[in-house]
Amino acid sequence: MPTSVATDAPRLEVTNLNRSFGGRKVVDDVSLSVAAGQVTCLLGPSGCGKSTTLRMIAGVEMQDSGKIMVDGELVCDTVTRVPAEARSIGLMFQDFALFPHLTVAGNIAFGLRGSRGQKAERVHHLLKRIGLPHYADAYPHQLSGGEQQRIALARALAPQPKIMLMDEPFSGLDNRLRDDIRDETLEVLKEEGTAVLLVTHEPDEAMRMADEIALMRDGVIVQRGAPYNVHMRPVDKDAAAFFSDLN
Ligand code: ADP
Ligand code: MG
């Protein structure tokens, strides 16, 4: 791959992405971008097309049309298609399923290349960073939900992806834990400088974590902006209603 020339290009740039299932458009001309070190939230009610959008960016679902650029490089349009594993994209989902037969260190090192020593160093750094320095030899079933979540974050970040795609990653956690894990996750992501596209149907999560919100409805991005602006100046009644549970 040629090295990127457009250093000030957004880390992720999606242009006019479309996808239909059985004649029904579920992603309708979606454009969005994420800068390095920024969190963009794709926010909208269940079924509006968020996961489909994310899956196309990840490269596990094909778009009908549209263009996806990572760090100034074309990774997908109707002609070019860089495979998922070559896109420098990290993934986190609600069902983040660590490998049960691997230790914590084994899970984090799974996608890493390099010498044994380099891998061990990266694993150690990440374990320390997520506050679990002594867990290298533990197995996933020995950990709490919150701990597993943090390990999943470390695993996704280990290969230093340019972009992190997160699909409702906190929805499996109980309320008491969730805000803490959100804050910790955000801190680690900011420190790593990763560009994040976070999918959620919860306005409070978007308000807490996003630098920018892209509000989605019926496959369409109806509004983009800073969280405060999207919340306080909703584009229409439906957008206002969607935020109405927030105070
Ligand atoms: P969200 O993540 O916002 O809840 P999704 O992207 O999962 O929404 O789904 C958007 C719409 O597309 C839904 O109506 C869903 O049923 C439909 N859909 C998603 N994947 C498929 C598929 N593989 N085949 C048919 N319909 C699908
Ligand atoms: Mg979804």
Image (cartoon, rainbow, N blue to C red):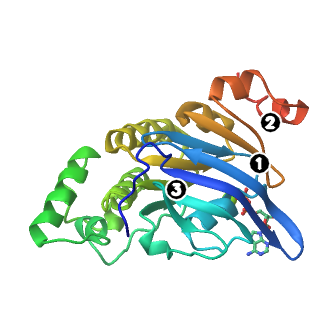
What percent of the width, then of the height, locates residue 11?
47, 50
- Rounded to the nearest whole Å, what is the CA distance between mark 3 and mark 2? 23 Å
- According to the picture, the residue beneath numbered tag 2 turns out to be 242
Number of residues whose C-alpha sits closer than 10 Å to that of mark 2, classed few (under 14), some (14–19) or many (20 or more): some
- Rounded to the nearest whole Å, what is the CA distance between mark 1 and mark 2? 8 Å
Label 1 vs 3, first from the N-terminus: 1
- According to the picture, the residue beneath numbered tag 1 turns out to be 45
Kindly identify the residue that appears in the image at 59 percent across and 61 percent down.
68
What percent of the width, then of the height, locates residue 100?
36, 74
Label 1 vs 2, first from the N-terminus: 1
Q: Residue furthest front?
A: 5
Q: Confirm or deny contact between disc 1 and disc 2 (CB under 8 A).
A: yes
- Rounded to the nearest whole Å, what is the CA distance between mark 1 and mark 3? 18 Å
In this image, 159 relative to 90: left or right? Answer: left
- According to the picture, the residue beneath numbered tag 3 turns out to be 165
Kindly identify the residue that appears in the image at 82 percent across and 73 percent down.
21
Q: Quadrant of residue 148?
A: bottom left
* Relative vertical location of residue 7 with respect to residue 122 in this rendering, above or below: above
Q: Secondary structure at mark 2?
A: helix
In this image, 222 relative to 84: left or right? Answer: right
Residue situated in front as seen by the camera: 61 or 181? 61
Mark 1 residue's CB less than 8 Å from ligand 1 = yes
Identify residue type, mark 2: Phe
Identify residue type, mark 3: Leu
